[in-house]
């Protein structure tokens, strides 16, 4: 599709986003660190490997079942750093606020950010506040950027999946996406679905402590599990085979997805990870994931295969196999 | 003033902004690095002092005489790092774009960012793009965050001004503010005033190479020279005495300020710095500033005095003395 205007799809995290990044941004900001397109940049500072990540949060509604934009912004960047294998340490917080925004709500958001930073064990060390006239932004947008250090024994990246790797998923999918959807559809009182927003850095530290064979870490946020697996398949030039019956989906999430016409494979998660782990280490790493409060329902949901590089296949519940493609456009704008 | 809603003044960089930072943000994100409130956070990573800074850019109009939001966003964060005495190295870029924004304009902005990064000698290593539905943001907002390393011999901070220090200003003030003002007032074709947006890191490197006595570096952006000097006076518990006749103001800038009713002391600069330098080093440092393309009009505009700690005084052209206070509210929203 050719267009001369920015579409919602350009921010979806799907195919059109990727194309814009590849065609418009990479050629201009041309450097090998950016070109890796991991969840964060990885470089050396004084002999220490450092991860650096940024995300802006524009979620609508800003308060949703299970959280608000504040903790989402903290955990989102904490998790991006953790997916680089880094120990998150320092965050920046930049607020763009619409004139007239209630100070009481701002205080609630800031309080949630403070608690989230404490849970994750990171310090907010610098910030910025801009206020724009009424109607020039929708309530509040938050950018967080973060810095973490990568322990010597950790070496993960999206292109490192190898045939034989087990694919571990840390829990049920689509909880965040459905919590936002339900709230927008006015169903919030009829459902108990809550966002899974949570920090994953403690889980990652425990995983890396027991297994040296962790090749890829990824949090399937925008675009969901389906898009994240496709990115890994493409970057690793590997085939990925998953089993539908192994992927945890809460019954109420599955029900709402059916009701509203969404596929949970493409809905956002904000407290889940996928790990690609050498077969020998998979059991120990899975155990470490399950020992975390956010990983109790973790499962091995698939494996990397040598054939069909770049493709993701799913063995369905009824026994067939279907290709899981990358999402083309935007299922749900302003999900994070 | 007590209010239950966010006002434009909360984002002004003046008194109300400072109060919000002190009363709402510092108590929640309580840590000694943030509490210093420098242009960026300074901490050690593996024995290396690192500076980390963030800023969101919401300037209106996004294209203005002398630049656009893209280079402003790159130079702004580069300069914040330079004001920590750091060598800027890595930037993140996070875009929030309104649906329907012309791709041609986005390309022009990205191209300007690429050129700016090249001029400043920094790499854009990670990024994020969000698109919000039409009407939910005004065209485009850009956040940049950045990381730099601080050479061993450099040690600057806003609280380090000492009695006897010379106050060096690198050039004429209010150019950026007036260029935006003139554009908004529809005067752009009647004036030659251009924004001074420029990278200051090369100037800072040259200054630090010749003088060990540099105590404070600061770029007087939002709130202008008047606000920046007040912050330094307060943090250093020092009195600052400046001379109006030494402060360069371009005639066309002074004229437009008079026409539009603004005080150049409080208008934003995006390519100027002030340095507080021990008297013995002041001449050499001034020479280094003047050798830079952006520092030709540099001058010593004042000095730090032992009396009246926390206050800024200006000896006016006609020989009187007036107090230069911190700006209370917002002279000009969306200036950067």
Image (cartoon, coloured by chain):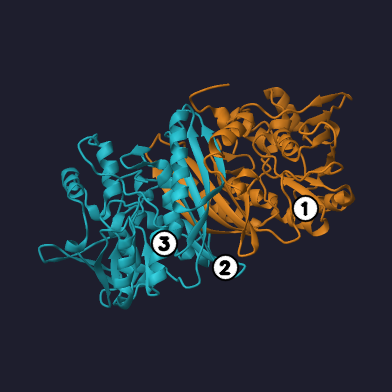
Chain colours: A cyan, B orange
Residue lying at the far left in this picture: please name it.
A318
Dots 1 and 3 on the same chain:
no
Mark drawn on residue A48: 2
Q: CA distance from mark 1 to mark 3?
A: 42 Å
Q: CA distance from mark 1 to mark 2?
A: 33 Å
Q: Is residue A17 above or below residue A68?
A: below
Q: Tag 2 or tag 3, which sits nearer the N-term?
A: 2
Q: Residue at x 47, y 63 (%)?
A: A86
Indicate the secondary structure of the residue bearing disc 3.
helix
Q: Are the residues flagged by discs 1 and 2 in contact, CB closer than 8 Å?
A: no
Instruction: Tell me which chain the residue with mark 3 is part of.
Output: A
- In the rendered image, the quadrant that contains the C terminus of chain B is top right
> Exactly how many numbered labels are in the figure?
3
Q: Are the residues flagged by discs 1 and 3 in contact, CB closer than 8 Å?
A: no
Q: Identify residue for label 1.
A: B292
Residue B334: in sight, yes or no? no
Looking at the picture, tell me which residue is in the foreground, A44 or B268: A44
Residue B20: in sight, yes or no? yes
Q: Are the residues flagged by discs 3 and 2 in contact, CB closer than 8 Å?
A: no
- In the rendered image, the quadrant that contains the N terminus of chain B is top right
Within 10 angstroms of label 2, few (less than 14), some, or many (20 or more) residues? some
* Apparent side of residue A145 relative to residue B98 in the rendered image (left or right): right
Within 10 angstroms of label 3, few (less than 14), some, or many (20 or more) residues? many
Indicate the secondary structure of the residue bearing disc 2.
strand
Dots 1 and 2 on the same chain:
no
Residue A223 rendering spot, x and y as whole percentages: 32, 54
Within 10 angstroms of label 1, few (less than 14), some, or many (20 or more) residues? some
Indicate the secondary structure of the residue bearing disc 1.
loop
Q: Identify residue for label 3.
A: A83
Looking at the picture, tell me which residue is in the foreground, B319 or A248: A248
């Amino acid at each position: 599709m050719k267009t001369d205007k920015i579409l919602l799809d350009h921010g979806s995290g799907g195919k059109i986003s990727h194309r814009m990044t590849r065609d418009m941004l990479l050629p201009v900001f041309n450097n090998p660190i950016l070109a890796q397109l991991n969840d964060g940049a990885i470089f050396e500072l004084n002999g220490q490997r450092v991860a650096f990540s940024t995300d802006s949060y524009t979620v609508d509604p800003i308060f949703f079942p299970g959280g608000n934009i504040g903790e989402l912004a903290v955990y989102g960047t904490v998790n991006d750093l953790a997916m680089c294998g880094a120990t998150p340490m320092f965050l920046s917080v930049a607020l763009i606020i619409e004139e007239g925004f209630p100070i009481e709500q701002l205080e609630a958001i800031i309080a949630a950010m403070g608690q989230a930073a404490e849970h994750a064990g990171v310090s907010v060390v610098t910030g910025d506040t801009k206020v724009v006239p009424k109607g020039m932004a929708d309530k509040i947008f938050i950018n967080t950027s973060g810095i973490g250090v990568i322990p010597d024994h950790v070496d993960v990246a999206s292109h490192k999946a190898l045939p034989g790797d087990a694919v571990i998923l840390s829990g049920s999918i689509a909880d965040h996406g459905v919590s936002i959807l339900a709230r927008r559809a006015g169903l919030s009182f009829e459902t108990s679905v809550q966002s899974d927003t949570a920090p994953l850095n403690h889980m990652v530290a425990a995983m890396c402590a027991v297994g040296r064979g962790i090749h890829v870490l990824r949090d399937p946020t925008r675009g969901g599990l389906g898009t994240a697996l496709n990115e890994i398949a493409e970057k690793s030039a590997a085939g990925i085979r998953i089993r539908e019956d192994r992927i945890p989906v809460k019954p109420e999430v599955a029900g709402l997805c059916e009701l509203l016409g969404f596929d949970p494979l493409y809905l956002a998660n904000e407290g889940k990870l996928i790990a690609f782990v050498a077969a020998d280490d998979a059991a120990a790493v899975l155990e470490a994931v399950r020992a975390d409060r956010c990983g109790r329902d973790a499962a091995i949901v698939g494996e990397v295969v040598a054939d069909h590089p770049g493709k993701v296949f799913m063995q369905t519940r009824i026994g067939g196999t279907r290709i899981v493609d990358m999402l083309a456009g935007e299922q749900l704008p302003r999900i994070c």
